């Protein structure tokens, strides 16, 4: 994909998420790999509802900012996914309400945050890791992602929000939307003893779609 088209796609998909209430104000950030190995990144303090393709932060393949506005302060999160998951083509970080709310619930499994409610959550996310609370912009967030050694494509920062890596921008956005919807389902079903996928059914999905499930 040409860089100009990728710039437009980033802004269009970000605006779609904003319009549907997945992130508000100047929260959230997004990045995507360019054909030359560089990155396009949403600027700091920007709103997903009004990103300008011409003002996206542009990094070269060496990780040096070469054009555009100052990038998001959450660059350590993005960089960690690109460094540890070689097939990563895009990273999305939101402050979506249901995922944040679920991160605060007692008795959740930090190694497998979301209950096995649907096949698509298993397919698109694998196991989701809950990471501790960090002050926004803390480089330690990136260190926490690196500590996973590339085994997880999706994490949720406690009391903060989800971060998802995908092979390209569409995959990352769709996986992020699946994470938020699964967290919403989990909250809606709390206390209702829902019929979740069995371990055997989860394994069928994992095997058929070659999902990382470590």
Image: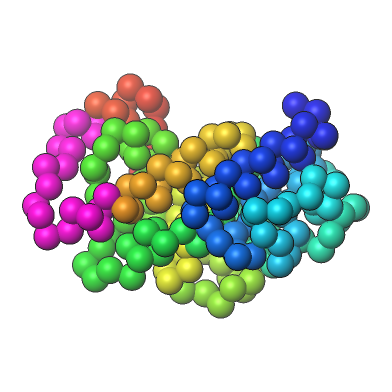
Query: Left or right: where does residue 147 sit relative to residue 178?
Result: right
Farthest-out residue, top: 208
* Residue 54 or residue 206, whichever sits in front: 54
Farthest-out residue, left: 193
* Residue 45 or residue 59, whichever sits in front: 45
Residue 60 is situated, as x and y percent measured from the top left of the image, at 85, 46
Residue 138 is situated, as x and y percent measured from the top left of the image, at 62, 73
Q: Is residue 72 magenta?
A: no
Residue 77 is situated, as x and y percent measured from the top left of the image, at 61, 59
Residue 39 seen in the figure? yes
Query: Left or right: where does residue 10 sit relative to residue 143?
Result: right
Residue at the location (33% across, 38% down)? 122
Residue at the location (56% across, 62% down)? 24
Residue 34 is situated, as x and y percent measured from the top left of the image, at 77, 37
Q: Is residue 90 above or below residue 201?
A: below
Figure quadrant of the C terminus: top left
Figure quadrant of the N terminus: top right
Farthest-out residue, front: 19
Which residues fall within the magenta stretch? 185-203
Q: Is residue 42 above or below residue 135?
A: above
Residue at the location (45% across, 44% down)? 177
Farthest-out residue, bottom: 135
* Residue 139 or residue 178, whichever sits in front: 178
Q: Is residue 194 magenta?
A: yes
Rendered image quadrant of residue 126: top left
């Amino acid at each position: 994909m040409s860089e100009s088209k990728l710039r437009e796609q980033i802004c269009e998909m970000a605006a779609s998420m904003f319009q549907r209430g997945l992130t508000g104000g100047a929260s959230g950030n997004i990045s995507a790999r360019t054909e030359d190995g560089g990155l396009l990144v949403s600027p700091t303090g920007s709103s997903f509802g009004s990103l300008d393709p011409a003002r996206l932060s542009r990094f070269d393949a060496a990780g040096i900012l070469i054009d555009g506005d100052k990038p998001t302060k959450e660059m350590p999160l993005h960089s960690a996914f690109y460094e540890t998951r070689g097939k990563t083509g895009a990273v999305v970080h939101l402050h979506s309400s249901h995922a944040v709310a679920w991160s605060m619930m007692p008795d959740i499994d930090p190694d497998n945050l979301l209950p096995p409610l649907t096949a698509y959550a298993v397919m698109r996310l694998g196991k989701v890791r809950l990471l501790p609370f960090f002050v926004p912009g803390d480089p330690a967030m990136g260190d926490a992602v690196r500590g996973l050694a590339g085994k997880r494509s999706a994490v949720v920062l406690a009391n903060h929000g989800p971060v998802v890596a995908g092979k390209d921008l569409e995959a990352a956005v769709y996986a992020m939307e699946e994470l938020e919807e699964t967290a919403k389902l989990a909250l809606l079903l709390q206390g209702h003893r829902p019929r979740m996928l069995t371990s055997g059914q989860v394994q069928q999905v994992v095997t058929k779609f070659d999902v990382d499930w470590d």
